[in-house]
């Protein structure tokens, strides 16, 4: 899942948590075991 939250890592983490929760709600029976954020390249 690609998160483009700008240069602030906290914003990216919050967006990632929200998007993961939405994805899990759409896929009942699956569980989240971890959330890893890797830095990307700046434009």
Image: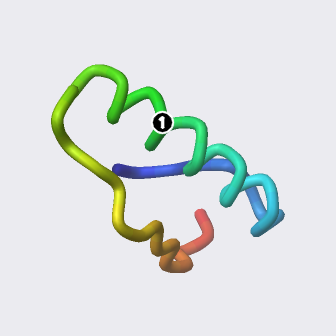
Tell me the quarter of the picture where residue 13 sits: bottom right
User: In this rendering, would 23 be left or right of 30?
Assistant: right
What residue is drawn where x is 34% and y is 32%?
23
Please determine whether, in this image, residue 33 is positioned above or below residue 39.
Answer: above
**For this view, does 30 lie left or right of residue 11?**
left
Which quadrant: the C terminus?
Answer: bottom right
What kind of colouring is applied to the model shown? Answer: rainbow
Residue at the far front: name it: 29
- The number of callouts visible is 1
Q: Is residue 9 above or below residue 11?
A: below
Q: Residue at x 55, y 78 (%)?
A: 39
Where in the figure is residue 40, as x and y percent of width and height? 51, 74
In the image, residue 15 lies at what x, y percent?
A: 64, 44
14 sits to left or right of 2: right
For mark 1, give the secondary structure: helix
Q: Residue at left 36%, top 24%?
A: 25
Tell which residue pokes out farthest to the top in this image. Answer: 26
The residue closer to the viewer here, 30 or 18, is 30
Q: Is residue 32 above or below residue 18?
A: below
Q: Which quadrant would residue 12 be assigned to in this image?
A: bottom right
What residue do we see at 59% from left, 37% from top?
Answer: 18
Judging by the rendered image, the residue that carries numbered circle 1 is: 21
- Within 10 Å of the Cα at label 1, are there few (<14), some (14-19), or many (20+) other Cα atoms? some
Residue 14 versus residue 28 in the image, above or below: below
- In this rendered view, identify the residue nearer to me: 40 or 36: 36
């Amino acid at each position: 899942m690609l998160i483009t939250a700008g240069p602030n890592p906290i914003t990216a983490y919050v967006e990632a948590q929200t998007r993961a929760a939405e994805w899990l709600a759409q896929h009942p029976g699956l569980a989240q075991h971890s959330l890893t954020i890797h830095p990307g390249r700046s434009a």
